[in-house]
Image (cartoon, rainbow, N blue to C red):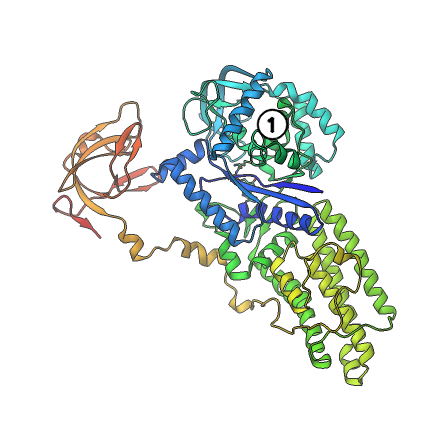
Amino acid sequence: MKFYITTPIYYVNSEPHIGSAYTTIVADIIARYKRFMGYDVFFLTGTDEHGQKVLQAAQQAGKDPQEFCDELAEKFKQLWKELKITNDYFIRTTDEMHMKTVQEFVAKMKENGDVYKGIYKGWYCVPCETFWNEDEVIKEGEEHFCPECKRPVKWVEEENYFFRLSKYRDPLLKYYEEHPDFVEPDFRRNEMLKILEGGLKDLSITRTTFKWGVPMKDDPEHVIYVWVDALINYISAIGYGWNDEMFNKWWPADLHLIGKEINRFHSIIWPAMLMSVGLPLPKKVFAHGWLTVNGQKISKSLGNAIDPRFFVKRYGNDVVRYYLIRDIMFGKDGDFSEERLVHRLNSDLANDYGNLLHRITAMIKKYFNGRLPSPSAQEGLDSWLKERFFETKDAYHELMDSYRLTEALDKIWEFIADVNKYFNDTKPWILGKEGNMERLGTVLYNSLEAVFKVALMTLPVMPDTSKEVFRRVSFEEKPSKEHLENWGVLKSGSTVIHGEPLFRKIDAKDFKKVVETVSVEQNVITIDDFSKVDLRIAKVLEAEKVPNSRKLLRLIIDLGTEKRQIVAGIAEHYKPEELVGKLIVVVANLKPAKLMGIESQGMLLAAKSGDTLRLLTVNGEIAPGAKVS
Ligand code: MSP
């Protein structure tokens, strides 16, 4: 029994935030559940590193794109490690093996008559790396915007290779009909069906105006469209074209887990590509909803694109995982609200779950010297508790198997409420006082066995907490579904540890939102950070417009000990002749970068407000080369 699960591969144009971590955490939960159920699991994640969006981010950072991607990919890997993500492999689209597979895959589509040359004329959104037709973009006067992210789109007119996507409309419709569970949730499937019913246009799959991508095998002037490159990761990672045995073991994928905005790529374009080369389609694409944070869209400029580690540090990894699944209905859009998180922590985790274990182990310590008593004759309440467990367990499997993760946790917490009721109704503290040790032993045994069952069922969501519960009840086996099959797995006589409460509550008076404290903290730099920037005064010796550029000026500056050339985007605000003789402030130790093919050996400083831009200068004469600090 195998299970192959994937996440989208993340663009490395910026660092991950709680939104991008969401998919990976959910995939980790499903992977852990499947392993628990005895499946041989392959869990894949990785990074999407080609295309204009990443290239532009590298250029803005003044870095070589490969070096830039290496740094960012490392950050993703490190984060997943810290979040205890159990991926089996991490693919990067700049990996040699992947690039070769992409070339071969596209060559095969061409061989099969599905790729032809044509002229592309249309709009392109770089942030979404998506082509849009004239009738799809939003028009406001002369300006055109992306219907998905609402940012400006660019006009593209190029000779490209096209993929005959239109040919796959009917085969796809048939496939959807024959596999009603292919795309979930069903409202996402319906969206895809609407697109299919409306007809498909052929897709431009190469670009020639930049180089940061995989070159076409027999026409290397063309680089392969970043989405085609990225989707192929799902098969290149498992050996397609380089390890048949491994590939045949894992393909088709059992689950592509994605966010809703990239469903069309996964549920229409990718299946058509696979049909073109004659490979089976993935068994399921599940498109989940989008998170906002404290009611706001996640965005760098709003200061809430926060590194998930800050939340984990404040609340704990298991708590964040639990909260994300329990409070946000899996599949729908939802809000990551810290108030709700704290509420869930205090009430579901600390009160309902942690405190229950605490009360049980306290009594085992007091009355049985920290040894688990044996159960004896069973009464009505005992049978009721067991029955409730078996009902819960069956529902749990059914819900987890159909990825209804939120409802699975709801069921477990209904059971926890029942265990609390059992504990309160059997009144073990009175049994203890009365010295009814036989009955007390039965009640404590059943209560602890019930909590142990909770730890087994919550293991995929809260692995560290479950591990701690197993330690406290001296359960040393490898947890698996067999331990959920029967009641009475815990061994009487074994040591029971009465430790610290499993969860620490957060007091309302101590509650400060991570978003408010960290967004400021994240932007704070030390004096050492600042001293890395070598700011100098320079005198402008020459200035001229860069040919074919609206924005750029080329300046020759005097830095005291040397002359340098810099390129600055100020042509719309200053005439070249206005600048000659001015004393300006420049970053002298910035790595040189090319702008429109001209090397800039530094950067000048300017202030911007709306459409106004003003250069930084000094208040009086000073020698060029003077240090600014
Ligand atoms: N590189 C493409 C995917 C290629 S897959 C062959 C891409 N990358 S991305 O970095 O933009 O990440 C997209 C994924 O990150 C989404 O599909 C979703 O899984 C996750 N999320 C990013 N922001 C999110 C939220 N605010 N909320 C929930 N998930 C989010 O698209």
Q: Quadrant of the N terminus?
A: top right
- Residue pointed to by mark 1: 269
Front-most of 149 and 267? 267
In the foreground, 70 or 587: 70
Q: Position of residue 316 (x, y in %)?
A: 55, 60
Mark 1: is the Cβ under 8 angstroms from ligand 1? no
Q: Quadrant of residue 178?
A: top right
Relative side of 45 to 370, left or right: left
Q: Is residue 209 above or below residue 478?
A: above
**Residue 128 percent across, percent down from the top left:** 50, 33
Residue 466, compared with residue 539, is above or below; it is: below
Name the spot of residue 162 as percent of width and height, x first: 54, 19
State the image coordinates of residue 516 (x, y, percent, origin top left).
47, 57
Which residue is at a point 60% across and 27% down the rendered structure image? 269
Rendered image quadrant of residue 260: top right
The quarter holding residue 242 reads: top right
Q: Residue furthest bottom?
A: 434
| Ligand 1, image quadrant it occupies | top right
Q: Is residue 53 left or right of residue 629?
A: right
Amino acid type, residue under disc 1 in the picture: Ile
Please name the residue shown 73% across and 36% down the image: 181
Q: How many marks?
A: 1
- Which one is in front, 68 or 189? 68
Mark 1, secondary structure of its residue:
helix
